[in-house]
Image (cartoon, coloured by chain):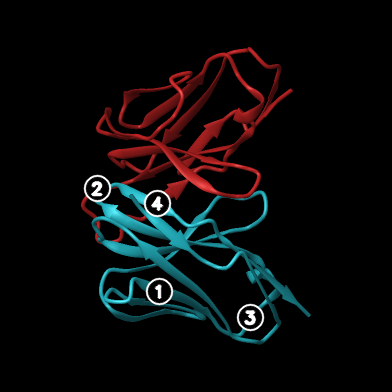
Chain colours: A cyan, B red
Amino acid sequence: GQSLEQPSEVTAVEGAIVQINCTYQTSGFYGLSWYQQHDGGAPTFLSYNALDGLEETGRFSSFLSRSDSYGYLLLQELQMKDSASYFCAVRSGYSTLTFGKGTMLLVSP
Amino acid sequence: DTAVSQTPKYLVTQMGNDKSIKCEQNLGHDTMYWYKQDSKKFLKIMFSYNNKELIINETVPNRFSPKSPDKAHLNLHINSLELGDSAVYFCASSQSGTSTGELFFGEGSRLTVL
């Protein structure tokens, strides 16, 4: 089966940088995804790493180390609108995505 | 145009009733899913269909029955509702074979069982 661990809550101030870590155990691994979900909204795709290294998309970057079964999401220049839950998810098959329990990010002024 | 739409958005019902949630996607994707998100925000896969064929069926009570009349639609019927079924149910779709496997989610259907 699959299991993912990520912190339940992270707090930061506007303009800061925050890193949300994710460790996973899985049988079969295609890649690690990150999703953002605002309160009352739908999860939306942020990034995907299939290979080791850093992927950058604007203020957000995602990192993967397959040998360590570890990844992180890095959010820079935090804005109030970044307050949301962030989920890492392991893709263990073409159509199989298992989510972590989510990290609630609270950004304060 | 909404890419993945599900109805109803809210559902309040009594224990023991039967209810259905409908989902449609206009993205041309070949794979659709139902996820359950509980009060602790844990997103758990329930079912996945690829081209109308069931490919994932997690340990879900058989009171839950998905139906995919075509690859653009995936409905969820729940019999004999229980208090523990209260949750937000998300429909999602994806296209198999893409490099990222990105899921596109509907806005969710909040089910409250009294």
Tag nearer the camera, 3 or 1 = 1
Mark 1 or mark 4: whose residue is earlier in sequence? 1
Spatial CA distance of label 1 from label 2 is 24 Å
Q: Secondary structure at mark 1?
A: strand
Q: x%, y% of residue B41?
A: 60, 50
Q: Is residue B9 above or below residue A104?
A: above
- Residue at 26% of width from left, 60% of height from top? A29
B23 to the left or right of B50: right
Q: Tell whether label 1 touches label 3 (CB within 8 Å).
A: no
Q: x%, y% of residue A41?
A: 62, 50
Specify the subunit that label 3 lies on.
A
Q: Tell whether label 2 touches label 4 (CB within 8 Å).
A: no
- Residue at 35% of width from left, 76% of height from top? A64
For label 2, the residue is B96
Q: Which mark is residue B57?
A: none
The outermost residue toward the right is: A109
For label 4, the residue is A98
Which amino acid does the dot numbered 4 rest on? Thr
The outermost residue toward the left is: B97
The quadrant holding residue A46 is: bottom left
**Can residue B110 be seen here?**
no
Residue sitting nearer the eye, B26 or A78: A78
